[in-house]
């Protein structure tokens, strides 16, 4: 199968920042001892990367998708590995029909993007036994037609948790980099920093570090665009998208923007992960956050829509739909 240049979306997730507060990455950017290559590597593989790659193949009008990332994009890989980071139990998937290993009540941002871009099926997890089934006509693994979802909750950017691997050299040319969201506004960080919240009940320090990092990230995207021949890099301001959702939640149809829908204890339900004994809000589409760390399906739909059709104030110089069609 011959592939054209892929569209890649990098989602810089908040959970790794909760553990490191961006300190290592801020140090890397400001340190004169860090090489440019090292900084680029950090950008491409930092903070539990979530990546969505679309390779346009000749056997399909859309082509297979290859997805890398963490809990935001995990479609069930962690179901098959020995880890405490699992979501193959109720109440996860309550609005999906059943628990699937997705760390939300329903669909992920990737699921929604795939549907909007024309994919008929969700990309299967890499470890799913279903990928071993061959196509009777082509006598080749389904992976060549469907693609693979490699995302695994708990994935990290350190050498201990993942291997470094630069994607431009493999043919990636259309790249969307999503900046760090307002991690201080997650229920987990609100409860962990209960004595240092701003007027929106968001943790001040983590959000400030995210803002500093995002300024440097935007400059680096411009630099990479100029240095990587033939590349199309897009910067997506997810921080402002999520901030607007949180600050103006009623405008989007939400009734709660600060607390976990699936909760046990904590002022914001952020002290203990979602589990079988957790309480679950009745109207999941009225909550911005599903669990202490991850958005609800309703919030994911807004994020996905912003990536697909947002203007240059949100995603520039092109949105995902324009980049996909270019």
Image (cartoon, rainbow, N blue to C red):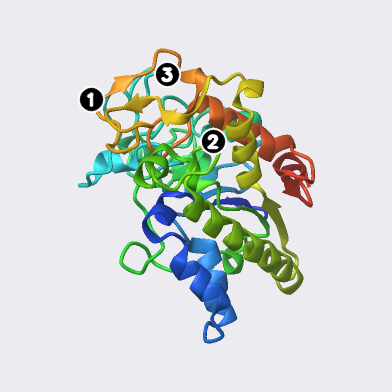
Q: Position of residue 65 (x, y in %)?
A: 54, 43
Q: Position of residue 289 (x, y in %)?
A: 46, 31
Q: CA distance from mark 3 to mark 1?
A: 15 Å
Regarding residue 57, the answer to whether it shows in the image is no
Residue where numbered disc 3 is placed = 95
Q: Is residue 210 left or right of residue 289?
A: right
In this view, 110 is above or below 222: above
Residue where numbered disc 1 is placed = 276
Please tell me whether mark 1 sits on a helix, a strand or a loop.
Answer: loop
Which badge, 2 or 3, comes first in the chain's sequence?
3
Regarding residue 180, the answer to whether it shows in the image is yes
Q: Closest to the observer: 230 or 212? A: 212
Q: CA distance from mark 2 to mark 3?
A: 14 Å
Q: Closest to the observer: 40 or 63? A: 40
What number is the disc on residue 109? Answer: 2
Disc nearest the viewer among 3 and 1: 1
Q: Position of residue 179 (x, y in %)?
A: 60, 53
Identity of the residue furthest to the bottom in this view: 33
- At x 62% / y 21%, what residue is drawn? 250
Which badge, 3 or 1, comes first in the chain's sequence?
3
Q: Is residue 173 left or right of residue 128?
A: right
In this view, 292 is above or below 264: below
Q: Is residue 287 left or right of residue 323?
A: left
């Amino acid at each position: 199968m011959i592939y054209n240049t892929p569209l890649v979306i990098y989602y810089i997730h908040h959970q790794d920042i909760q553990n490191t507060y961006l300190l290592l990455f801020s140090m890397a950017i400001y340190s004169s001892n860090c090489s440019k290559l090292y900084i680029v590597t950090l950008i491409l593989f930092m903070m539990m990367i979530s990546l969505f790659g679309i390779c346009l193949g000749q056997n399909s009008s859309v082509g297979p998708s290859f997805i890398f990332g963490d809990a935001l994009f995990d479609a069930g890989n962690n179901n098959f590995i020995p880890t405490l980071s699992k979501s193959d139990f109720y109440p996860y998937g309550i609005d999906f029909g059943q628990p699937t290993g997705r760390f939300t009540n329903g669909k992920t941002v990737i699921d929604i993007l795939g549907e909007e871009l024309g994919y008929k099926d969700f990309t299967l997890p890499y470890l799913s036994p279903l990928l071993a089934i061959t196509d009777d006509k082509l006598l080749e693994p389904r992976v060549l037609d469907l693609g693979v979802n490699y995302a695994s909750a708990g994935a990290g950017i350190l050498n201990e948790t993942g291997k470094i691997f630069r994607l431009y050299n493999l043919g990636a040319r259309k790249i969307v980099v999503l900046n760090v969201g307002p991690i201080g506004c997650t229920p987990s960080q609100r409860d962990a920093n209960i004595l240092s919240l701003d007027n929106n009940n968001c943790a001040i320090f983590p959000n400030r570090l995210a803002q500093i990092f995002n300024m440097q990230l935007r400059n680096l995207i411009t630099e990479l665009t100029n240095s990587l021949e033939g590349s199309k890099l897009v910067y997506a301001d997810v921080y402002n998208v999520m901030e607007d959702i949180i600050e103006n939640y009623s405008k989007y149809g939400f009734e709660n923007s600060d607390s976990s829908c699936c909760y046990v204890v904590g002022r914001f339900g952020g002290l203990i992960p979602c589990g079988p004994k957790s309480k679950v809000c009745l109207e999941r589409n009225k909550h911005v956050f599903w669990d202490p760390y991850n958005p609800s399906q309703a919030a994911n739909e807004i994020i996905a829509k912003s990536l697909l059709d947002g203007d240059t104030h949100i995603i520039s110089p092109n949105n995902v739909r324009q980049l996909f069609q270019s």
